[in-house]
Amino acid sequence: MKAMLFAVLLTVMQAASQVPREAADVPTGGSQTVEKNSSGKQPPTTPSFVPNAGSPANDQHESSPPPNGNSQQIIVVRELPPVTVTTDWWSKLYVIFTGALMIVGGFGVLFALRTLRAIESQTRVLTEGQRPRIVANPHGDPSKTLADPYAPRVELEVINKGPMPATDFRYQSWIEVLPFPFEDFTAAADHFKFDITSVLYPDTPQVINIPIRGGITPEEFTEVKRLREHVCVRLYVEYADPFIANRRCYVNFGFYAQPRGLGFLEKYNGLGYEDKKA
């Protein structure tokens, strides 16, 4: 057994001695050269130059000019490719549904406009109902007040029938004995302008005296009794508009005296609005 192990070991040693050793990466002669040149004298070295073997790629780069960044290339398309769009039943249903929505929306806009007009009309009526409304009626018996020898006059009762007070209230009056048919007041009419402003509250009557300051002659009074001439009166009332700051409201009243009460002069009966004077 020992002889067999000894033979195997001898065989392995022989095989290992026959394997050749590999040479080192740096030859031993290089180290000797460094040792010899350690005195500082370097041998002249020639630069190694490997000429380019004229490759086709290099020749092409050397011969072709460099590309220009501003150059434009024109591409001509001879024929567009055909495009086919296929629609399924979902797309058709979407188009139908969109059209129906547009129709319904149009009807909705029309109904909204009608509703808006109705609201504007109701607002206008409500606003007009809140404005002051000035009414003038005869106060007392005109035949008796005109027969007063000391102060012949016509008395009018002015009432605000609206829910809001008439602010900045003022008036003017004209009175004159004129024949009929009535045309207009003349320059001889007794004109009075009351510039002191006041407030006319709702349902609070105010009596306005319109005197004939020059008096009535007996002849004129006789003609008045015979109804050949008439005592004509005009009352012009103005006040501030509560809803429009730069506008004033005015009302005209025209009357003529009768044996029992007052008649109306058509020319001076009406109302309106005008811009406030600066």
Image: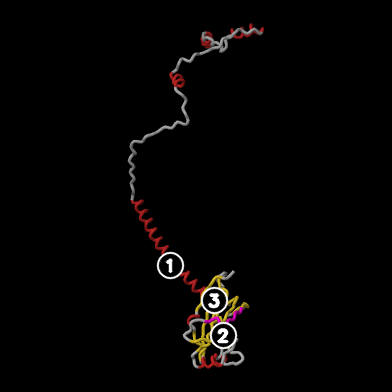
- Inspect the image, locate mark 3, and give the three-letter code of the amino acid beneath it: Tyr
The residue beneath circle 1 is 114
| Residue 157 numbered tag | 2
- Inspect the image, locate mark 1, and give the three-letter code of the amino acid beneath it: Arg
* Between marks 3 and 1 in the image, the one whose residue lies nearer the viewer: 3
Q: Position of residue 114 (x, y in %)?
A: 43, 67
**Toward the viewer: 260 or 18?**
260
Left or right position of 31 against 268: right
The residue beneath circle 3 is 250
**Toward the viewer: 212 or 53?**
212
- Asked if marks 2 and 3 touch (Cβ < 8 Å), the reply is no
* Residue at 57% from the left image edge and 87% from the top image edge: 155
N-terminal of the pair, mark 3 or mark 1, is: 1
Q: Quadrant of the C terminus?
A: bottom right
N-terminal of the pair, mark 2 or mark 3, is: 2
Would you place residue 36 above or below residue 230 in this image? Answer: above
Would you place residue 14 above or below residue 192 in this image? Answer: above
Extent of the magenta region: 185-194
Which of the colour schemes (rainbow, by chain, secondary structure, one colour) is used? secondary structure
Q: Secondary structure at mark 3?
A: strand
Calculate the distance from the C-alpha at mark 2 to the C-alpha at mark 3: 17 Å
Q: Position of residue 59 (x, y in %)?
A: 45, 19
Q: Is residue 188 rendered magenta in the image?
A: yes
